[in-house]
Every structure is written in C-alpha cells, then in structure tokens.
Image: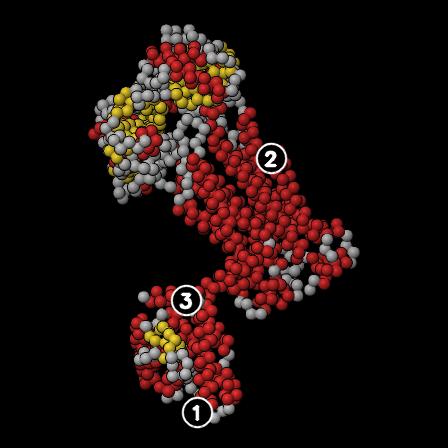
Amino acid sequence: MPKPSDLLQGTLDLLILKTIARDPLHGWGIAKRIQILSGDVLSVGQGSLYPALHRLEQQGWITAEWKDSDLGRPAKFYVLTREGRKQLERELKTWERLSSAVQLLIENA
Amino acid sequence: MRLVRILFRRGYSLLRKRRAEEELARELEIHIEQLEREFVAGGMSASEARLAARKEFGPVEVTTELCRDMRRVNLLEDLFKDLVYTSRVLGRSPAFTLTAVLSLALGIGANTVVFSVLNALVLKPLPIPEPRQLVFVNNSGQPANSFPNYREIRDRNQVFQSLFAYRIEPVSLGDERAAHRVWGYLATGNYFQALGLEPAIGRFYTPAEDTQTDASPYVVLSYSCWQNRFSGDPNIPGKEVRINGRPFTVLGVGPRGFHGTEAFYWSEIWIPMTMQPQIEGHSWLEAPSTFNSWIAGRLKPGISIEQAQANLKTIAMQLARERTVNEGMQLTLSAPGLAGSAGREPTRAFTLGVMLLASLVLFAACANLAALLTARAADRERDLAIRVSIGAARGRIVRQLLTESLTISVTGGAIGCALAVVLCRLLSQWRAPMEFPIQFDVNPDWRVFLFAIVAAIVTGILFGIGPARRAWKADPAMSLKGLSTHVSARSWSGRDILLPLQVALCCVLVTASLVAVRGLVRSFRTPLGFQPDGAAVVGYDVGLAGYNPRDGALFEERALRAVSQLPGVESAAYSSTVPLSIDQSTNTVYPENTTDFRPRNAIRTSHFNVSPGYFHTAGTRLLAGREFTPQDDATSPRVAVVNRTFARRVAGTEDAVGRRFRLGPDTLIQIAGIVEDGKYENLTEYPKAALFLPIQQDYSSTIVLMVRSARAESEMAGEMRQALSRLDPNLAIYGVGALNQMLGLVYLPMHAAVITLGAFGILALMLAITGIYGLAAYAVSRRSREIGIRLAIGARPSQILRSIFGRIGKLVTAGAFAGLGWGLAGAGVMASIVYQASSRDPLVIGASVLAIAAVAIIAAFGPARRAMRVDPVQSLRHD
C-alpha cells in the first residue's frame, strides 16, 4: 500500500471543517473518515490532527462537547459553529480557486 | 459572537487549566485505545497491540505540548510565570530591590513633578473653548500697550475675530460690614465673548455696556469668589456690592475653574474697562504714553499665526509713524497665560532646563541600574546557561530578564507617581507668602500620568536591555565553565561608558546645586540698598476706600502719627511702594538740557514716592545732600533724591546735589540728595537708576507704611494694622508683616532653583554611590578566580586592590572631569537664575571634587573588602 501523501499545507483545516460539516465527530472519527472518504489516499497524522482541532476551537470555528460515543465511553465531539460554516465556505472557495489554477497550469503548460 | 467564544475559550484554558489538561489527556487516550483495538482486530496480541498503538501514535507528550501551544495563552501564562519568578528573584535580594525601586521612584517622581509644573505653566491651555485660537499681543517683548494703541489695533486688524484688552487690578470689595482687597481684571466688553465662555449663573457684561466712561458699574465674579465670599448665593445676579466704596451691580458668575487669562494669577472679579477712571482715580484710557493694557484676542478661523503677525507688523509700522511714543514698536504674538512672551519665554526656558536636569537624573538612575543588573546577571550567568543548555529559548530568557527590569521600573514608577501626586497637591495648595494671588494649579492630569507611564516603561527597557543583550549573546558552554565571554579585564567594553557617564552626570548636578546654594548664600548678603531686617510694613490703598488726594494726604499724616506712638517704634515713614515688592513703577526722565523728547533720549528709572524719614527708616544710606523734610510740600520747589546710578546717568556725575533734571518737557526737578544703589525689581538686575520724589509733592493713593523697631516684625505689623483700623475701619489693609515677606516674589525663582537643584544633587550623589558600588562589586565577583590565583601565588593585598580599583579609578576620574567641565559650563546658565552664582568659584570646584572622591571611596569600600577576603582555595574550587 503506497504511503498516503502528505497533506498540502493549509488544507488540513479545510478537511476537518468539511468532515464535521454534516454531523459532529470525535477526533478518532475525523481521522478515520478523512482516510476512508479519500479512498485511503489522505491520512492525517495524530501529531497534527489534535493541535489543529485545538487551534480551530481556539479560533472559534468549531466547538466541542463530551458525549457518549460509539467507542464505548464518552468522547469529545467537535461541531461546526456558525462562523465555522462561513469559514468553511471561504476555505472551499480558496481551495477551488487554487485547484482550478493548478489544473489549468497542468493542462496548458 | 466569535470574539466572545474566543475569549471564553481562552479564559477557560487559562482558568480551568487542570480540567483542560485532563480532557486533552483523555482525548488522546481514546485515540490510542482505538488504534490498539484496530491492531487487536488485525490479529495482534493485546500487549503487542498496545506497543504498536503507542508507536503509531508517536510521542504523546509532543502532541500534548503542541495542543497546549495552540491554546495560545502561553504569552499570558509565561508572563504570569515570569512575574512569579521575578517576585521570587527580587524578594531574595531585598537590598538590591529596594535600592533599585527607590532610586527609580525618586527619579520618576522628580520627573513627574517637574513635568506637572511644565504641563501646568506651559503645556496646559487655558480652560476655554478652542484655546489654540487665543493669542497674546506683545509690544516689543513687553506685555503692556497703551489703550489708544489697543483701539487702533482692534479697529485696523483683519485677522482677529475679536481683540480685547485687560489689566490686573486690585480693588476693595465691600459689603455692609467690611472691605477686603481682592485682585481682579479691568477688561473690555468683548472679553467674555472672545473667550467663548458661558456664565455659571447670570450674564456677562457686553461690548455695549463698555462704551461710556464711568457709566457701567457692573462686575462679574469668578466662581471661587462667588463660592468663598458669597457662599454660592444663587440670587447674586442683580445684587449690589461696593467696589472701592462705590455701588456696583453683580451681573453674573464666571464658569467653574476659570480664573482669568493668566495661568498663575487667579482673578476674582471682572470690571468693564471704561470704569478705569473711577477705579484708579485718574484716566489713562486716552493717554498714548501710558502702557497699562494687556492685549489678547481670538484669531479668525483659518488665520495662521504668520498671517496674523504680518498684519500686525503693518499696523505697528503705521502706529509708529503716527505717534512718536510708539517709535520702534513691534507687535508679536505668543500663547496667552504667562504675561505674553515676557513671562512665557523665561518660564519655559527654566522649566525645560529643570526638566532636562530631571531627565539627566533619571538617565543616571538608568545607567546605574543597568550596571547593577549587569553585576547581578554575572552572578546568574551559570543559572541562565543551565537553562539555555536544557532547552530554554534565548528569547524566553531575554523576556524573563526584561520582565524583571520592567517590574522594577513599573513599581518604581508607581511609587514615584504617588509621591509626585502628593507633592503636586501640596504645591497647588501652597500660596506664595505675599499678598499677590499667585497660585499654581499643578495637579496632574492625564498628560502627567501618560508621561509617568512612558517614563517607567522606557527606563525599564533602557536599563534592562544591556543585561538582556548579554544573556542573548552568552555562550552557555563557557558560562558553565565559569568563563564568560568577556573574561579579560583589560578589554574595554561599551559597558565601561556607563560609569563615567553616570559620574559625569552626578558631577554636573552636584556642581550645579553647589553653585546655586552658594549663590543663594551670597544673595542673602548682597546689598539691597535697604535693610529689610527689623522693618515691619502694612500696605493699603486709600483710593480704594474713596479718599481724594487731599483727604488721603491728611490720612497719611494721622496714620504716621498713630504708628509712631506705638511702643518700641524707632522710626516710621511711608512710601508709594517698597523696592523688590511686586508693585514697581518706572518713569522716564531727561537730562536738564534736553530739547528732543523722543523715547530714545529718555532715561528709564525706578520711581518711588516717599515721605520724610523714609531713607532712615528703610535703612538706605544717604551719601550726599539731605533727606526730604516736611517742608518739601506742594508749595515749595520740586526736589528729588536719586541713587548713584541715576546721578551718573542723568547728571553725568555722582556729585550731583543741586543739579536739575526734567521729568517731562515742562517739569524741572532739583536733586536734593544722593543715596546708595540698591536692587529694585529683582536681585539679578544690573545697577538701575532710581528716583525718589517727596510724597507730599507727588501724591500716591497706594501706601506702604513702614516702621523700624527692635520688636518682632509680625507682632509690630499686627499692632500697626490695629492702629490703622481704629483710624478707618473701612480701609482694606493688605501685606501685613515683615518687609522680608514682601520680598517673597523676588526670592521665589531662586528658592525654587535651589530646592530643585539641591534635591537633584543629593539624588545624583545617591545614584553615584549605588552605581560605583555596583560596578566595583561586579568587577570583584567577575575576577574572584583571578584574585584567588594571584593571592595563592603570593600577591600582596595592595597589589590586588590596585589592579581592581585602578580601572574603576580611571573611569571615575574620567567621568568626574567631564562632569566638572559640563557643570561649570552649565553654571553660566545658573548664574542668570540664581543671583551671584559664579562658576569660577574655587570652593564649588573643590567641594564637587571632594564630594565625588568621597562618594567613590564610600561606594567602593564594600567590594574592596570582599576582594581582600577572597579565599584562594574557595575561589579556585568554585567550579
């Protein structure tokens, strides 16, 4: 199995925000879902996931609460705030602009 | 909303730290647990799975630390930790902390007080709307102009919205029972409009109410006058008061905090300018050569000072052409509040000079603390090196050191500020010991506090930056071995400049204060031209009590007889005023043969009207001729007594008895006597001409009654006052006391200078002691290893001493010489403030050198003892 590619700098926030956009998730769940949804291409190291979660929480994009979980004990679930949703939209736009630019370059160069 | 959440999160992380930490640990634990389960599901044994999960997760501590960092409260947390650590470090060496905080408190306190005074006198604008538009019109550097000139300038200018004239005027304010002398202004009708003021109650008089001579008996009271003298009577508008014995109607009360257009003079009452003839008994409103009006005005919006000056220049030229008395007149603008530029410039120069000295003291304190901190940092070098080598970021250590210096400076600043507030309160409440209402409102405002805060922070950074820089550059490996980067005692570093600089500053301040103190001592011995000791005086103004010249003259005779009969009186006399009091008049005279009476041929002279026996009573020596006698009255030929300078200038010889001079084109006066020169307006003046005329020939309604006796002056003056009250209970009497007290104003700047300089000198000496001590202690502690080796191989203590103190001695000597040079140069400036302060005074130079030497020896004594007691074995085993 090829090693999942390293995440492009700055896209981790986008991935996290997008992943928890539908329903709240705990850290483990977020890591797993990113891996599954990306078809095992993307993997988020624990070393960067948790600091990122805490940073987003400090910035007010996401908030967290302890709830019973599927893991057999209460876990810390992260959920988007209203501002977080706006931030997600902004990040999506930025990402689209960036990726289409990269696409354009690859096609035309 | 987001901001609230962020703040909440940060607060949570900071305050519920333990809880946040637990949650974080739990969160990561869950993750590891899940990994473990996955591995078990993949077929590993439980113990294998646990290991693999740990491995997969990576270093938990690092992740935890990263998460903590993300919580972004580190800055605050670190600050808190730094503060706790700082308080522990400072608490461990209370002597150092106390020295540092105290010297800064004194330094910052002194600066804050001086800045308060500067702020009150020079920076703070008058309490009126748009104060910047208000400007004062100077007449060739002097505040006063003639009233006809005022009218011309008012009507011809194109730059003023309104231009008003005013004059400081003492009046007697009476009610049914008694009269009091109060100080106020005569002011033109547009005064209040131009200032843009609203009355507290009632109304102000208007320009329409200031057009007819003696037709507007109205007054406006100041807020404090209304509160203090009329107990804030709400029905005061419309009430009648007696001004100089005549009825006037109170129109209204000025706004709270408004004391008129001079910063130091608190006016209680305003009277329309057209009432001047009635108030003063003679009119100068139409006199082109009587310069009694001060002029100020509000500029039109958008008019710059330069435009206004240009306009005034044209007008001044016109006026100079039209009236010979205006010859050479220059109209210039300055900020109002200190008698125009005449008072403003010296006040500004003086306060800025003192400010400079004060900042030098603070600077010396900084240099001193920097030296002390460097010395301490040397002791802590190993400690810091250990911290660096186990992974502390240098930035953190620098921050820690700066936190320490800022803690010291802010604490010092706070104490200094508190001291300054107390001192300023006292100063604001203090009334100069004279009857003129001089009052300084130096209570600190926001500018002062801003200044103190900035001063504290800047000093903290200034004296903290050096040690912090050293800590930044230090090599931990070397430090741990006990070898710092600058181990050589021979190399001179930038730090070495601190001590000479400080000694130099100290020297400047000590020299300056010694010069000032010597000057003060001498000025007390300076011949004043009269003997104030033993003379008691009482001042009053019969004009204010409604006497005409004939009744006034009769009253003086009765008053003189009454006080002459008091027990203990050796002699008694009266005069229009006494030399060196605030009330001085000048006159212009011409030599006898003058035909051209233009100002350039006039000779200015101080002018006094005195009674027979005045010179004997005042203690003025008569050099030739005779004193006035009762026979020199209105029916006899006019005579004068003049001083030597007058005789030399006007008659061309000191042997001038019998010669004549002109008091105007038509008045010839014969010189009957010559008296010694004296001081008339201030103590630092050059010899001035003085003219004394017999008061029976030249009436004055203001009187200073003087007696000489062997009894205590204040007791004597009290009895004189009672005697006068028996003669006329309605007379407003002022200035009761020793003649010395009347001289308060001329001594005021000098006393202020001596007190400030003395305080700064002592402060500087204290700072020098701590500074030299710090450096010496530092040198000894740096070189204890070397000293140990040298002692071990047989060096004599004297050799050690020489090697340690040779260097400090050189630094101190260099600093002392530089400082002495500056100090002597600066003493020239001092000489203009403090009378007879001479820079070429061997006593001053000797005392300064002695003081510095003594300070250096005292300061170096402790460290020297330490150096002698270095135990070779101990110091070598040190590492």
Q: Nearer the viewer, mark 2 or mark 3?
A: 3
Image marks 2 and 1: residues in contact by CB distance under 8 Å = no
Q: Name the chain letter of the residue that bears numbered label 3.
A: B
Who's the residue at 36% across and 34% down the image?
B262
Who's the residue at 45% across and 50% down the image?
B453
Q: Secondary structure at mark 2?
A: helix
**Measured Cα–Cα span from mark 2 to mark 1:** 93 Å
Same chain for mark 2 and mark 3? The answer is yes
Q: Position of residue B781 (x, y in %)?
A: 66, 56
Residue at label 2?
A: B844
Q: Position of residue B261 (x, y in %)?
A: 34, 34
Q: Mark 3 belongs to which amino acid?
A: Tyr
In this view, the residue farthest toward the left is: B208
Foreground: B570 or B796?
B570
Indicate left or right for B571 with B199 as reference: right
The local crowd at label 2, few if under 14, some if 14 to 19, many if 20 or more residues have their Cα within 10 Å, is many
Q: Which mark is residue B12?
A: 3
Q: Which mark is residue A1?
A: 1
Q: Position of residue A100 (x, y in %)?
A: 31, 81
Q: Mark 1 belongs to which amino acid?
A: Met
In this view, the residue farthest toward the right is: B794
Who's the residue at 44% across and 71% down the image?
B20
Foreground: B860 or B502?
B860
Q: Secondary structure at mark 3?
A: helix
Q: Position of residue B434 (x, y in %)?
A: 43, 27
Q: Mark 2 belongs to which amino acid?
A: Val
Q: Is residue B818 above or below residue B737?
A: below
Q: Nearer the viewer, mark 2 or mark 1?
A: 1
Foreground: B569 or B43?
B43
Q: Which mark is residue B165?
A: none
